[in-house]
Image: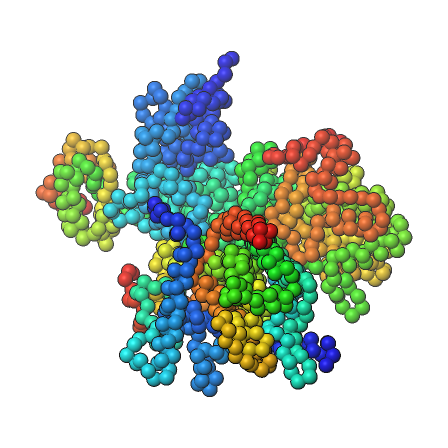
């Protein structure tokens, strides 16, 4: 068959039969204004913004609802189309309150964008606007609804009907009284509710958590992977680097989903989305040493000196390391090279994040760690690992270790007490404060995933890369650099120059990862080889 | 509030005639309205459960059509057309006249619960404008006098 | 603009320098002489250089002078600011710090929990006034003496910006 | 009196004169610029209601300098940041060591030399110290960890290097004529007369060199119209990150350099302490008239003459500074390299030819 081509705005483009004109244009970098169309939702064709002229068709057609034909010639930028789109926008804006100063959507709002693109600059509307009765009302744990700003594109309705199949959102009443709402007295009852905030092209649905925290134009973003569960949904970390007085000094203000057709399509669950506060709250910033008479803060380098001494002094076989499935592949590999291979330390993967029965058939997994699969591969663990908390003591062996390094996990308190009573030296390497960190003899602060680059392997075996978003807090260091510091102090010849280089070493040494590189992981990650 | 057994029987009969819950919704709503004078908001959820469809869709449909009343209405329901043809031929005067005679605003019901007055868009009888619909019956080519006569004839 | 053509003497620069020096020197010695004569009580009729003796003798300022900021009030006395951050965004000196909060009145929705302007950083450009969509911030207080002995003292808070002792001197509201 | 004691006393005397003059210049600059611009100038500082035509501002300024916070930028280099103003001030002050303020004064049995040391290479010493001043500027700019300071330092270094060449070369003609590098010898030489009536001052022997030296000298001291390195209204310059007395030292060094340039111009081109027709035993007018004076009186008159000339050239520099606008940087470089340098070389050639032909 010959090539199937369409011509849009004079560019001849190869198209897939059956695709819509709008999707074809978007896939090829031609932007046609649209509100109701969303690539992850069924086509509704009700906003009329994507009108285009198709040669041979007398009336303008909506690009989202028109399927491409071979040889079709489409214009989206001529005067006729512009005029029509301008009038559509004028209609959409008739009842819009234009309260941009107090609207959180301002800055990422479809109305603002297209107004700048095709809008009329003087309103011709002399009548009174229809004021819908409700100003911002919460319609769920995370979502705020402001019916005045709604343009009835029905994306949210379609999301709850087609994606979550929970049907909470609907359009009630008729004509210019029509409004979106939840059933009277009801609320959003799905675990993906905040996605309707993302897909709302205007400020009708805004996020209650983000509400008034920060204007969106202060935010920068970095591509990343959600650390909330083993799914590894692709996210963008939105952080505020310049105005620390907003949001009470929190640097990371929200996670937004990033499309990846192989993992999460366009969506993100609420649990993962609102897991971001751990990046800034209750962080361990400086190393701490527990001595007689209290806890003393010390520099990371001094803490590493101390830890190296302890590692040297501890008899081999009496040191144990509790891995964390929150570590990146790179961090795990550094731990493997130093602790398991060079020092012969016993490495266990404890499981502190499994919530049985929590999974659903969409995105949410039971395993709440982003990199359990990676830890299993790198440390050659079987299906019985991770070790459940109640079996941890048995896992540590008959004789309790002299020196126990715990990575991030919070040990069950009976075990913790028993270890301390038995005289075990407890070293906590971690990002956030917990009871184990409070009880540890030595605390080494680590950076969280957002403060470094690296990769996670999701439960299916897809290796995905995350980028650095914010700088480390205080003295916190990436785990691999801690291991490198220890290696230097112990006279072990190991070099970890950075995540990309570590990943290169990793791919050279571990079969499952062979052939991968940081570069090959963009944009959608890559599958490991089958073990 | 629950669906009465009688209503359930009616609904069961209707369900026989339609392939699924969504398609039976409109006749079901008519049945509810026939039984309850209007569609009580509290009945929407039981109805949705009985038809196995989302309650939101029931509410969507019941608020969309002007034939479905979401509030109690009078024994007689006057729909007077306010759209272009009727308006050009004096529907506005008739509307004001009706409102005066009944002492209510469009959309309200008289205090004794006798008559409800609603203004609607087109009734589809532009050739006999102005038109009103009273208890399912069209009254074409209205004047103030004919309106008075019709009102006088109501119980 | 066309450059004036210079003749050789002018291009040599030195004679022109001398000419300039002569002018300034003449002013110097004329003023010096007059001032010395005034000191010893002579030549009272001849005026020497005079300037405004500023702190004792305040200068009248132009009506459109951009002076210290103030925040406008609604009729009920609350601030007109809705914390939209336009001023904070446009501010080239990054001297405005706003923290937004929910307003009890749902029709207003948003208000500043705190609104600080660091006059130690402010460059008095007036962009904040231009950017404000609510006419909530103005620079028409005519307060020009804002120095302080501490850095903290240069920080204007919401309260400072709303309440002024000399409010009667300010231009009256021109828009609602 | 031992050599060292003598040197110490003279040093003390010269330092006090120079520093007082420099301090006075800070006041004079403000007052003079005001009068030139039809203003009044500093007059607010008062003690018990006395304002002393603004003279107390010198005290107020220095008090302020001493009491201000001594600030070093967080990522600056503290050692060099502290060292820089001292280098600047030291290099400027040390030049005075070889400048003769007057002749040897006969005081009772001893004679007092009004210079700290005299050597065959005094002039080289002056030039060497002048060049070392760059270190002060460059340390200041570099150690401040600030773009503007660094830019100012770069500009300063480039400017001083460029003008030092013209400055040095312009002096070669003078050295050829005087035949000595000792400033004392140079001053003594200028006691002679040309054609029987004209004092043999450098300005008459080497008028072009005098002009080049004055220009390059002002450029060396980084004052208007050559104040790009510190351009107050734009980049602030190498002392952007300075406060307290460390800034005060830079400020003082600036005025000391004014005095240095004035002193050098006086010594090299305007006869130093020489007064026309005044010989060691009294006035010797060209017509043959003779007016006897005691040696001490002659010495005092000559010291007074030196001070008057010094003061005049300080005044001249201030007048120039408040009259001329600043050059653009490219104009500055062009003037240095394309005009002053060729002119000074031409000056050597012409001088040489004249000396050979004579």
Q: Residue furthest left?
A: B145
In the depicted structure, whether residue A375 falls above or below residue C28: above
Residue D284 image point, x, y percent: 53, 74
Residue D13 in sight from this viewpoint: yes
Residue D244 image point, x, y percent: 58, 70
- In the image, what residue occupies the spot 81% across and 61% down? A420
In the depicted structure, whether residue D321 falls above or below residue A120: below
Q: Nearer the viewer, residue A121 or A322?
A: A121
In which quarter of the view is residue C39 placed?
bottom left
Q: Nearer the viewer, residue D299 or A252?
A: D299
- In the image, what residue occupies the spot 19% across and 32% down? B125
- In the image, what residue occupies the spot 78% across and 40% down? A379
- In the image, what residue occupies the spot 67% across and 42% down? A454
Q: Residue furthest bottom?
A: D48
In which quarter of the view is residue B39 placed?
top left
Residue A280 image point, x, y percent: 61, 55
Q: Nearer the viewer, residue B23 or B127?
A: B127
Q: Is residue A108 left or right of residue A494?
A: left
Q: Is residue A43 left or right of residue D196?
A: left
Q: Residue furthest top?
A: A1
Q: Residue furthest front?
A: D288
Residue C148 in sight from this viewpoint: no
Residue A101 image point, x, y percent: 40, 53
In the depicted structure, whether residue D70 falls above or below residue A203: below
């Amino acid at each position: 068959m010959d090539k199937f081509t369409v011509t849009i705005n004079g560019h001849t483009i190869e198209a897939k039969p059956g695709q819509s004109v709008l999707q074809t244009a978007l896939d090829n970098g031609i932007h046609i204004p649209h509100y109701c169309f969303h690539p992850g939702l069924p086509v509704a064709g009700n906003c009329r913004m994507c009108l285009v002229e198709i040669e041979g068709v007398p009336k303008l057609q909506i690009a989202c609802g028109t399927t491409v034909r071979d040889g079709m010639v489409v214009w989206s930028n001529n005067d006729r189309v512009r005029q029509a789109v301008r009038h559509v926008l004028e209609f959409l804006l008739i009842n819009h309150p234009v309260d941009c100063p107090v609207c959180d959507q301002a800055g990422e709002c479809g109305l603002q964008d297209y107004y700048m693109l095709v809008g009329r600059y003087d309103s011709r509307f002399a009548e009174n606007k229809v004021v819908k009765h409700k100003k911002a009302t919460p319609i769920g744990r995370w979502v705020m609804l402001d019916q005045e700003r709604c343009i009835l594109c029905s994306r949210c309705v379609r999301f709850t009907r087609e994606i979550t199949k929970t049907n909470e959102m609907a359009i009630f009443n008729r004509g210019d009284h029509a409004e979106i709402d939840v059933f009277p007295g009801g609320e959003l009852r799905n675990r993906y509710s905040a996605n309707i905030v993302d897909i709302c092209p205007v400020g009708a649905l805004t996020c209650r958590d983000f509400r008034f925290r920060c204007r969106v134009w202060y935010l920068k973003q970095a591509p990343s992977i959600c650390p909330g569960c083993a799914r590894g949904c692709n996210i963008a970390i939105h952080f505020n680097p310049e105005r620390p007085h907003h949001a009470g000094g929190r640097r990371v203000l929200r996670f937004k989903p990033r499309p990846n057709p192989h993992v999460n399509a366009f969506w993100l669950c609420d649990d993962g989305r609102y897991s971001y506060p751990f990046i800034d709250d209750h962080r361990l910033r400086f190393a701490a040493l527990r001595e007689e008479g209290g806890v003393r803060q010390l520099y990371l380098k001094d803490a590493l000196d101390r830890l190296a001494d302890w590692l040297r002094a501890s008899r081999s076989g009496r040191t144990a390391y509790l891995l964390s499935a929150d570590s990146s592949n790179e961090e795990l590999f550094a731990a493997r090279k130093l602790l398991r291979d060079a020092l012969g330390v016993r490495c266990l993967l404890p499981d502190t994040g499994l919530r049985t029965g929590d999974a659903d058939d969409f995105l949410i997994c039971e395993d709440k760690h982003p990199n359990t699969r990676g830890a299993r591969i790198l440390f050659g663990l079987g299906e019985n690992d991770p070790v459940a908390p109640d079996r941890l003591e048995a896992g540590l062996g008959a004789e309790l270790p002299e020196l126990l390094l715990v990575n991030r996990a919070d040990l069950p308190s009976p075990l913790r007490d028993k270890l301390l009573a038995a005289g075990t030296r407890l070293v906590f390497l971690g990002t956030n404060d917990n009871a184990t960190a409070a009880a540890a003899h030595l605390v080494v602060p680590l950076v969280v995933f957002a403060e470094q680059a690296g990769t996670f392997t999701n439960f299916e075996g897809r290796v995905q890369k995350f980028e650095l978003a914010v700088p480390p807090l205080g003295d916190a260091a990436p785990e691999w650099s801690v291991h490198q510091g220890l290696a230097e102090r112990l006279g072990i010849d190991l070099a970890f120059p950075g995540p990309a280089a570590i990943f290169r070493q990793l791919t050279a040494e571990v079969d499952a990862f062979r052939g991968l590189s940081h570069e090959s992981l963009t944009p959608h990650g890559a599958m490991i080889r089958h073990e | 509030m629950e669906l009465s057994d009688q209503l359930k029987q009616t609904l069961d009969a209707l369900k026989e005639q339609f392939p699924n819950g969504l398609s039976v919704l409109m006749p079901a709503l008519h049945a509810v309205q026939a039984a309850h004078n209007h569609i009580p908001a509290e009945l929407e959820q039981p109805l949705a459960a009985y038809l196995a469809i989302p309650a939101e869709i029931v509410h969507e449909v019941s608020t969309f059509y002007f034939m479905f009343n979401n509030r109690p209405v009078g024994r007689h329901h006057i729909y007077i057309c306010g759209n272009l043809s009727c308006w050009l031929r004096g529907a506005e005067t008739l509307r004001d006249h009706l409102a005066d005679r009944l002492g209510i605003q469009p959309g309200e019901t008289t205090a004794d619960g006798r008559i409800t007055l609603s203004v609607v868009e087109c009734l589809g009888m532009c050739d006999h404008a102005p038109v009103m619909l009273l208890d399912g019956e069209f009254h074409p080519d209205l004047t103030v006098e004919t309106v008075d006569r019709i009102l006088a004839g109501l119980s | 603009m066309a450059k004036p053509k210079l003749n050789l003497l002018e291009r040599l620069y030195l004679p022109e320098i001398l000419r300039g020096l002569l002018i300034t020197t003449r002013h110097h010695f004329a003023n010096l002489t007059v001032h010395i004569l005034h000191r010893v009580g002579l030549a009272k009729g001849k005026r020497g250089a005079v300037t405004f003796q500023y702190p004792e003798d305040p200068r009248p300022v132009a009506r459109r002078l951009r002076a210290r900021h103030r925040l406008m009030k609604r009729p009920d006395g609350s601030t007109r600011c809705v914390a939209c951050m336009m001023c904070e965004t446009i501010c080239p000196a990054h001297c405005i710090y706003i923290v937004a909060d929910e307003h009890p009145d749902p029709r207003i929705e948003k208000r500043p929990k705190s609104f600080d302007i660091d006059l130690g950083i402010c460059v008095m450009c007036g962009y904040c006034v231009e950017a404000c969509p609510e006419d909530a911030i103005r620079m028409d207080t005519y307060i020009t003496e804002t120095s302080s002995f501490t850095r903290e003292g240069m920080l204007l808070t919401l309260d400072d910006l709303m309440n002024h002792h000399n409010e009667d001197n300010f231009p009256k509201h021109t828009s609602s | 009196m031992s050599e060292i004691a003598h040197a110490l006393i003279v040093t003390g005397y010269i330092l006090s004169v120079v520093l007082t003059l420099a301090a006075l210049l800070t006041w004079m600059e403000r007052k003079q610029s005001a009068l030139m611009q039809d203003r009044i100038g500093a007059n607010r500082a008062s003690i018990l209601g006395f304002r002393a035509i603004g003279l107390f501002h010198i005290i107020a300024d220095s008090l302020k300098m001493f009491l201000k916070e001594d600030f070093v930028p967080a990522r600056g280099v503290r050692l060099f940041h502290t060292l820089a103003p001292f280098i600047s001030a030291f290099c400027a002050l040390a030049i005075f060591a070889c400048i003769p303020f007057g002749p040897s004064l006969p005081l009772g049995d001893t004679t007092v030399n009004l210079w700290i040391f005299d050597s065959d290479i005094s002039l080289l010493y002056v030039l060497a110290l002048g060049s070392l001043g760059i270190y002060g500027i460059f340390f200041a700019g570099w150690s401040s960890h600030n773009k503007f300071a660094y830019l100012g330092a770069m500009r300063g270094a480039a400017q001083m290097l460029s003008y030092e060449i013209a400055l040095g070369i312009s002096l070669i003609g003078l050295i050829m004529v005087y035949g000595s590098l000792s400033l004392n010898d140079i001053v003594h030489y200028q006691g002679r007369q040309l054609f029987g009536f004209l004092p043999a001052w450098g300005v008459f022997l080497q008028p072009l060199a005098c002009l080049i030296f004055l220009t390059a000298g002002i450029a060396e001291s980084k004052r208007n119209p050559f104040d790009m390195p510190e351009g107050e209204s734009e980049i602030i310059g190498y002392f952007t990150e300075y406060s307290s007395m460390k800034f005060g030292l830079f400020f003082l060094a600036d005025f000391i350099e004014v005095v240095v340039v004035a002193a050098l111009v006086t010594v090299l081109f305007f006869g130093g302490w020489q007064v026309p027709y005044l010989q060691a035993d009294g006035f010797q007018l060209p017509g043959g008239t003779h007016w006897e004076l005691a040696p001490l009186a002659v010495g005092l008159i000559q010291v007074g003459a030196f001070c008057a000339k010094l003061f005049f050239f300080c005044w001249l520099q201030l007048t120039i500074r408040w009259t001329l606008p600043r050059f653009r940087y490219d104009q500055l470089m062009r003037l240095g390299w394309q005009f002053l340098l060729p002119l000074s070389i031409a000056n050597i050639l012409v001088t040489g030819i004249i000396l050979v032909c004579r």
